[in-house]
Amino acid sequence: MKYIATLIFAILFSGAAIAQLGVNATYRTNDAPDWTYSGAIRPAQDLLPETAIAIGLDYWLAMKAYRIDFVPELNFSRMSNTLDMGIPLETIEANLTSNWLSLFLNTNIYFLDLEGDCDCPTFSKSGGAVQKGIFLQVSPGATWMMNQAEFKEESKSFDDITFSLGAALGLDIGLSDLVTLTPMAGFRYYLPAQWEGLAAFLSGPDIINIDGLKSEESSIRQFYAGLRLGFRLDQR
């Protein structure tokens, strides 16, 4: 991850003539079909919570000839969940925590205005707001998954790096020459990630069916929606 951090700092502090910083918040749904636990007397439970909130910081770089923007983003999400693994008349719980640090290489394509005025935000543009502001975002990414489990007063960390691909639609709304508001909605698919060693950590003589952990590996699907606030730094 030190290479990812180096890249982020290089981008953020480069001497680009046209620069815009942005911060975003998204509400995400999680679907990891193979990360489930089904005990002998318990219904199936997901290792990840059904929903999560993610916060992102990005840096905007525009092409000069066409309205295709490169917007690398550093994104963080923290999730927690509890598995009920008990036997009859007794409660045994495992507390799971996931911290995800991601680098998303977002590319925004303004497909209705590819050869239009590239001087964002849309507040200063002539023409329809939808035509000037709507874009398709294609977003490959890499995520450092820092998972942790607490069980019977012990804890263990499980780290993995996985890759993903996202696609979204967004609409830039220029509030002024300095500030742009962008609602977005999209989908992200994560290649199979590992929670290696979790089954062994959760085992014990009073756990009826640890084999109910379907798999230590699963792909992950996320639908998300949120808002981005962009700040144009080179405007006066």
Image (spheres, rainbow, N blue to C red):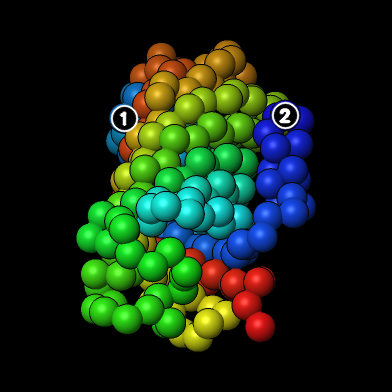
Q: Which residue is mark 1?
A: 33
Badge 2 amino acid: Tyr
Which one is nearer the viewer's eye here, 74 or 148? 74
Q: Earlier in the sequence, mark 1 or mark 2?
A: 2
Which one is nearer the viewer's eye here, 68 or 24? 68
Which one is nearer the viewer's eye here, 190 or 127? 127
Badge 1 amino acid: Pro
Above or below, comparing residue 149 to residue 195 in the picture:
below
Q: Give the residue displayed 53% in from the left and 82% down from the top.
A: 177
Q: Report x, y in % for residue 110.
A: 32, 57
> What count of labels does the image hold?
2
Which one is nearer the viewer's eye here, 233 or 94? 233
Can the viewer see residue 77 in this picture? no
Above or below, comparing residue 203 to residue 1 in the picture:
above
Q: Which residue is mark 2?
A: 3
Q: Report x, y in % for residue 145.
A: 59, 33
